[in-house]
Amino acid sequence: MADAHAERVKGIFSEIARRYDLFNALSSFGIYRSWLRRVARTAACTDADRVLDVAGGTGDVAFALCEACPPASIELTDFTPEMLEVAAERITAGANLGVPCGLNVVDAHNLPYGDEGFTVVTCAYGLRNFSNRRRAMREAARVLAPGGRYVVLEFGTPPNAVWRALYRFYLTHMIPFIGGAVTGDRSGFDYLRDSIKAFPAQDVIAQELREAGFSQVEYENCTGGIVAVYTAVK
């Protein structure tokens, strides 16, 4: 079942890779850029940090770090080669601002890196797509050096009941419509909608991070809890 889930996710993102950034901009009314800036502020990289970006997609998080707090290097990874092809084109165009960026097709459940090799691991919109997110969390902990930071951006559950109801209505009706209009693949965005709606609330994810071996686990809601930025320390 895990293999079937992985292949489904890969198939969806391979189909929408070229239009994924446009979809993010339209579906969030551009607000997603403020979420990326929040991730960069939370990561607070220095020129001594070695960053692993898991589920890095087309490079949004990696390039936000390059702009706001350039690290020594970034290993930009994703499970879908087509997403990394877009990231590679952005690097060629200079989006990494001179920060060394490696590209690697990687399964987050089995990271091909040694123990304690990175000081920061980032993951945006990835946890809900993993067939075993607890295992992915443990892998992130394994490759982090002691004191290293795991910074996660993921969709959440708005605590305000009225805002939560409005958000659920938008998810149900507008996400597949916008995704289908932009990419021609409505079914893929039906999956994305369902994965967001099924994802646990923030306090559950925070507890899972603690159980995966992290300490100092905190999260900050953005846009009323539509998304949250988690920080966890190895």
Image (spheres, helix red, strand yellow):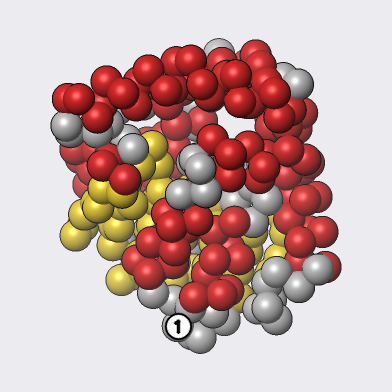
User: Quarter of the image containing the C terminus?
Assistant: bottom left
Q: Nearer the viewer, residue 156 or 230?
A: 156
User: Quarter of the image containing the N terminus?
Assistant: top right
Residue in the image at 51% along x and 43% along y? 29
Residue 122 seen in render: no
| Whether residue 199 is situated above or below residue 150 in the rendered picture | above
> What is the x, y in percent for residue 213?
27, 50
> What is the x, y in percent for residue 168?
35, 20
Q: Name the residue under label 1.
A: 46
> Seen in the image, is 105 located left or right of residue 138?
right
Residue in the image at 74% along x and 28% along y? 183
> Seen in the image, is 42 located left or right of residue 80?
left
Q: Which of 181 and 43 is in front in this view?
A: 181
Residue in the image at 54% along x and 35% along y? 27
Q: Which kind of residue does numbered mark 1 sit on? A: Thr
Q: How crowded is mark 1: few (under 14 residues within 10 Å), some or many (20 or more)?
A: few
Residue in the image at 28% along x and 62% along y? 233
